[in-house]
Image (tube, rainbow, N blue to C red):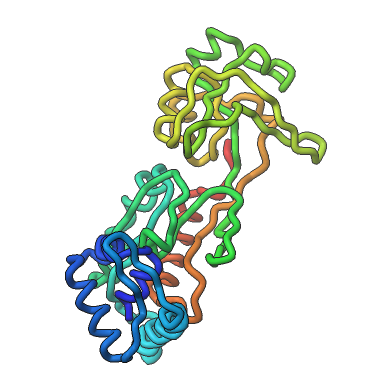
Amino acid sequence: MQVFIQVMESGNFTRAAEALNVPRSTVSTLIQALEDRLRVQLLRRTTRRMIPTAEGFQFLKTARDIVDAIEASEQMFRPAVSQRLKGRLRIDMPSRIGRRIIMPALPSLIEMHPEVELEVSMTDRLVDMISEGIDCVIRVGDLSNSELVCRKLGEVQIITCASPAYLERCGTPQSPDDLSEHLLVNYAPRFPTGPATWTYRAQDKLNVVNMSSVIAVNNVEGYLAAARAGLGLIQIPAFDVQDLIERDALVEVLPRFRAPSMPLSFLYARRRNVPMRIQVFQNWASDLLRREGVFGSAS
């Protein structure tokens, strides 16, 4: 049933096998065994496509409920403090949060749950959780998807920064009116990019300023590198650059005209019984991010 669920979510046997880290032949064999057991065809195969039957769609919800219920039943009589989680947990998160905060703290989580197999993806793009077999993701920004459960962990402050070299060359803007003389590093998770815009809140109103730009990037590491190279202003979560500001590698500008804070959220697929390993990781990550000052005020 677990394999069937992954095939349905991934769209074909090959992607399901990759998500489950098993040979494609194993996926095919197990689906055939499931169909033989149920005495019904769940999937129609062609040389190029896999098409679920009406019975396949009908069985999917039942399979999900059964798999989740079995996992929940295995945990129900174990005291929460002594629960040892098992199984694969595939997580996706922003690259900076993963590299700077989550990864250094993972040994403590693994020590508590040594039988959990973690697969960590660090990307700044919006992943397709269903087709890529991702159990849960951490994301910054406003998100909406009826197929996902979104749990807000907190709010992160957004500040505007530039390198000392850029400010020495172009001057330090004192108000949004000065931005016509400045460059903005354009950030876009996907290309082609839209216009370079700088946002700020003033008098309870959200304002958008169109700016000039000479470079666009599609991840946060590139965004920071461009700012440090003096290629323009950036707007970024305060926790991401606090260390750089303390070392004078970047300087906050326009502190009276900050963009609205953005939610940091934990997302997972909608299901009747949420696997215990997802709940545990959510609680662990939430506590860690709070301890690390991700939701704190920028100086």
The residue that appears at 23% across and 72% down in the rendered structure is 27
Q: Is residue 95 above or below residue 216?
A: below
The residue that appears at 53% across and 19% down in the rendered structure is 232
The residue that appears at 41% across and 30% down in the rendered structure is 222
Q: Is residue 138 above or below residue 205?
A: below
On the image, which quarter does residue 179 sit in?
A: top right
Report if residue 79 is visible in the image: no
Farthest residue to the top: give it.
169
Quadrant of image for the N terminus:
bottom left
Give residue 176's position: percent from left, percent from top: 72, 22
* Position of residue 85 in the picture relative to residue 252 (left or right): left
Quadrant of image for the C terminus:
top right
Is 15 or 208 nearer to us in this picture?
Answer: 15
* Numbered-mark total: 0
Farthest residue to the front: give it.
46
Is 265 or 247 nearer to us in this picture?
Answer: 265
The residue that appears at 25% across and 65% down in the rendered structure is 17
Give residue 236's position: percent from left, percent from top: 54, 36
Give residue 227's position: percent from left, percent from top: 47, 23
Q: Is residue 208 above or below residue 297?
A: above
Report if residue 142 is visible in the image: yes
Farthest residue to the right: give it.
203
On the image, which quarter does residue 133 sit in?
A: bottom left
Is 132 or 48 nearer to us in this picture?
Answer: 48
